[in-house]
Structures are given as C-alpha cells and as structure tokens.
Image (cartoon, rainbow, N blue to C red):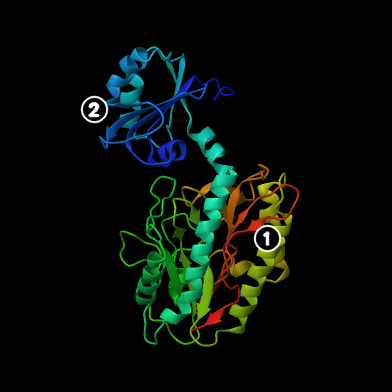
Amino acid sequence: MKQEGIDACLISSNTNIIYLSGLLYSGYLYLNCNGDVIHFVKRPNNLQLSDPILFIRKPEEIPNLLKEKNQPIGETIALEEDEMSYTDRIRVSKIFPDKTIKNCSPIIRVARAIKTEYELELFRIAAQKQSDAIREFPKLFRPGMTDNEFAIEMEYEIRKRGSIGVVRVFGESMEIFMGSVLTGENAATPSAFDFALGGAGLNPTIPVGHNNTPLNEGQTVMVDICGNFNGYHSDQTRVFSVGKTSQKALYAHQVSIEILNTIKELGKEGVACCELYEKAIEIVKQHNLTDCFMGATQKASFIGHGVGLVLNELPILTAKNKSPLTAGMTIAIEPKFIIDKIGAVGNEDTFAVRKNQAMEQLTNAPEEIIIL
C-alpha cells in the first residue's frame, strides 16, 4: 500500500474479507497502511472479532465513524475496483468526495499469491483429503453409468470427507460447481468459461463439464473435482478408463506425467512463469502431440495457475507471463490432451514453490490411468 501511495483500503469482496479477517461477513473491512483494522459490519449482527467492530446499515456511515474513532482517513483510499459493480464503486467513492480513489485489487491478488506457512499447512490438509477421496473413486463405478451419475457418486464421496462443496473463482462471468467429469467426445466440446478444458455441461446455462454421456468401453474418464475443505482449494485431476483404452491415450498420459515431473524440478523461486510454459510446449512438440494439447478446436493458452482462496489465483503459467516464481506460491499444473472419440488424459497436481529446491507436490493420488 505504501509503495502504491495508498493510505487506506476499504475491502468489500467475500474472498478478501476472508483473507484479511479469517471469516466472512457482509460489510466493509477498513485497513490503513499502518495495519489498523476496523470492521464495518452489516450482517451478521452477532459477529465477534479481536479487531474493532462497528455495525452499520449503509456505507455512508463510515466516514463519521472513522472520525469518532480518531482514525485519520488519509488522502488516498483504495477500493477493489476489479470486483465491485459500477454502481457500488460510484456509491462508495461519493462518501469520500475529497479523496483520491485508487484500485487495490491487483496488490491484494499479488499478496494472496504468496502463502504463509499457516496457509501452506491448510493446503496440505486439503490436498491429502482430496487425494484420499480420489483413491476411493474407482470403487464407485458401476457398468452402465453416465458421466453425471459417476460424478454424483464422487461428489458425495468427497463431501462425506469434509469438502465444503463450494468452489470460488475469480473473474467476470466465471462459474463452476465442484468440478467436471469428461469422457468421450464431450471432452473436446468448447466451453464459454476460461478453464483448461470444457465440456457441454448438463444445461446451456452452465456450459462446462459432464453432460450425461454414457461411460463406454475404451473411453477415458477425466475427473477434475476440486477439493475445498477449509477455504483453500487443492486442484487435482486424475484419469480413469472404462476397460482398456487406446495406446495414444496411454502415451499422451505418460507425456503429461513427464511434463509435471519436469516442471516440478524446474519450478524454483526466480524462474519465470513463461519458462515453465515454454518447457511444457517443448516436451509436447518432441512427442508430436501439439494437435491435441490443451484442447482440440479450442485450446487453452496456459498450462497452470495459482490456487488459494479462489481456484484461479496468480500466477498464470502462460507464454507472455515473465513474472518470476516466489517461494510460497501454490500452483496447479495441468498438462492435458484430447484424444479423438476417447476422451481426455493428463494429470493435474498442486505444488508449492520453495526456496532453492524443487516444488513441493501437495496432491498425491495415483498417477497412472486406473481401469474401471
């Protein structure tokens, strides 16, 4: 905040209120550059925190309450302009008519990208629970199932193990349920959402993931059901097959594992995100799999993304992102391939960036394609 010339932030988004307070409420979190915090709460009316809480009905009350607390407001107030509606941005700006208004969304996203040891431990717990659930998924399969029926059983299994069931995502018009299950030709179906792979979904209003495709002999079943057990999202994809699948599918899946292992070793603090992306592309070209990498007719332009309180945190592993990795970042890496008429293959794992060593792999379900 000091580097950006910001005297105070007024935070209102769910994710950032959770990040800065540890829980969710409706209202505004005031944070100045000295670290003073005041919670202006609309709901619930019984909230208790160690920091000062002032209950309000509307944001227009905030300036006078700050004066009553002898809290200097400063000259520059920052709002989460990337996440506020235009109406809310104008309304809140008007309560500080003589102040300069800046956008604090980018600096909070950068801060959230680098996890503390406390956050990393929450990741380890979530990743282990998700991995344990995935180990049970093959037992849930029954011949004659559709992808949706299989997904329901897997979602139930992961919920029984403590999953909150909510997946938070960042970005305009980004929506998802607990994850997706892709098989057969549906795996190559483009989606409106900016995910690695698409799928038609169960309804045109949510066009992503499983769509009641029967699980037929020889097809792969890619399971990308997110693990949110404590607010932090572990992202892990594993692939199954209904009986034996094609040699090309098996071969491409091994290339995915090769990419993951290579990036795990290369992904040290200071390495640029684009270097990891370029290395993945290099391996794909060596194996002549460019045509089916990260989609068929619609290809994703990244091979990994940060994870945290939302599923798609910073950084993004793309060709244009030259920003360096920093110790404490948690990144899901997902090199995936589409095999025509068979389905999708390729694993996804969540890693933590460490100092002067290979990335720590947090997710650990079996890597090979398991026959159902």
Q: Front-most of 124 and 226?
A: 124
Residue 212 versus residue 127 in the image, above or below: below
Amino acid type at circle 1 is Ala
The residue depicted at 46 percent of the width and 61 percent of the height is 226
Q: Label 2: few (<14), some or many (≥20) within 10 Å?
A: few
Residue 353 in the image: state x and y as whole percent.
66, 50
Mark 1 sits on what residue?
Answer: 280
For the residues bearing labels 1 and 2, Cβ distance under 8 angstroms: no
Q: Is residue 297 visible?
A: no
Taking depth in this image into account, of 258 and 338 the one nearest to the observer is: 258
Most foreground residue, 177 or 211: 177
**Residue 146: where, in percent of width, then height?**
36, 79
Q: Quadrant of residue 55?
A: top left
Give the alpha-carbon distance from disc 1 to disc 2, as whole Å: 52 Å
Q: Check disc 1 and report its element: helix, strand or loop.
A: helix
Image x and y of residue 76, in percent: 47, 18
